[in-house]
Amino acid sequence: MTAPLHDTSAAEPAAVAAPDVPQKAIEGRSPWQIAWLRLKRDKVALAGGIIVILLILVAIFAPLIVKAFGHPPEELHEDLLDPLLGLPLGDWGGMSSDFLLGVEPVNGRDVFSRIVYGARISLLVAFLSAFVAVSLGTVFGIVAGYFGGWVDAAISRVMDLLLAFPQLLFIIALISVIPNKLWGFEGSGLRIAVLVLVIGFFGWPYIGRIVRGQTLSLREREYVEAARSLGAGRFYILFRELLPNLVAPITVYATLMIPTNVLTEAALSFLGVGVKPPTPSWGETLATAVRTYEDDPLFMIFPGVAIFITVLAFNLFGDGVRDALDPKGSR
């Protein structure tokens, strides 16, 4: 008996079992992981971030750096000055292996040490005043945006008033009338405390407006309505539902606020209402250099370059953080 014409089972080779290949599980990425991947691709922002970290390390370890490469910032070296003109002896403002950036005219203090210690003052005022501004702006902005009505109107009018207030003139007038000792602070410590509070107080309306606008958009989202329908209280919704979704814009604005505060502190110290001499400050050094810049231009260049690098690094890093956290960004 012959096999059926259409029976091809005998002619087909046996099926070869495919080897078991382990499949790699697909892992999801959080928004912060996506932002970090975007930031890593932005080389300019990374360079700015590295400089920011180095500046912070210089401010923290200023005593060790000065001990290894310089001299105490308030130590006088009048023997290195021309007795008649008060200018540094030697070329390039008295630069040498012992004084890497030379010495100050008139008093002979180590410029390198004062630049390093000046980073402490500038970054301390910038970070603390930014913290005050972010804290106040976040609280008032989220409250105004969520509650609306007369609460929103009252807070918005206060923000408009503070934005129109002459901040610089107010600080100058305030510093002129405060006593030498207040709140347990005195001298430069008191000046720093006043600068932090005033700069932070007049800075919160800027971030308050941003937080208010974002809150107006987020309060109508589905997850907020779901929390409200489940009986969640207002403060639970504010700080457990809305605030975590506001971290990105708050972070971006904080990184862009710090360089502005650095410039503000330098300007106030330049005008004589910042920290008290002989406490090192970049703005105070610039003010001192105005009188001798024709004879010793490097004395003015070094603090100016320090301010420029600091502000540029923070701005580049802030722009990169903003692009990385932007969900519509292509980078």
Image (cartoon, rainbow, N blue to C red):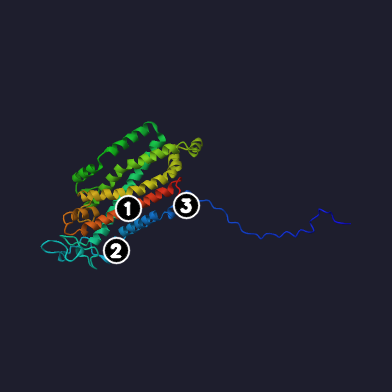
- Residue at the extreme bottom of the image, as rendered: 97
Residue at 38 percent of width and 41 percent of height: 210
Task: Judge whether 108 appears above or below 262 on screen.
Answer: below
149 on left or right of 168: right
- Residue at the extreme top of the image, as rendered: 150
What x and y, as percent, mark residue 192? 25, 50
Res 229 visible: yes
Between the residue at mark 3 and the residue at mark 2, the CA separation in whole angstroms equals 35 Å
Between the residue at mark 3 and the residue at mark 1, the CA separation in whole angstroms equals 26 Å
What residue does disc 1 label? 312
Residue at 37 percent of width and 42 percent of height: 138
Residue at 44 percent of width and 54 percent of height: 41
Residue at 17 percent of width and 57 percent of height: 294
Residue 171 appears in which quarter of the rendering? top left
What x and y, as percent, mark residue 52? 34, 55
| Residue in front for this viewpoint, 5 or 131 | 5
What residue does disc 3 label? 33
What x and y, as percent, mark residue 256? 35, 48
254 on left or right of 86: right
107 on left or right of 67: left
What x and y, as percent, mark residue 321? 40, 50
Task: Please name the amino acid that badge 3 sits on.
Answer: Gln
Q: Pointer 2: residues within 10 angstroms few (<14), some, or many (20+)?
A: some
Q: Which-is-in-front pick, marks 1 and 2?
A: 1
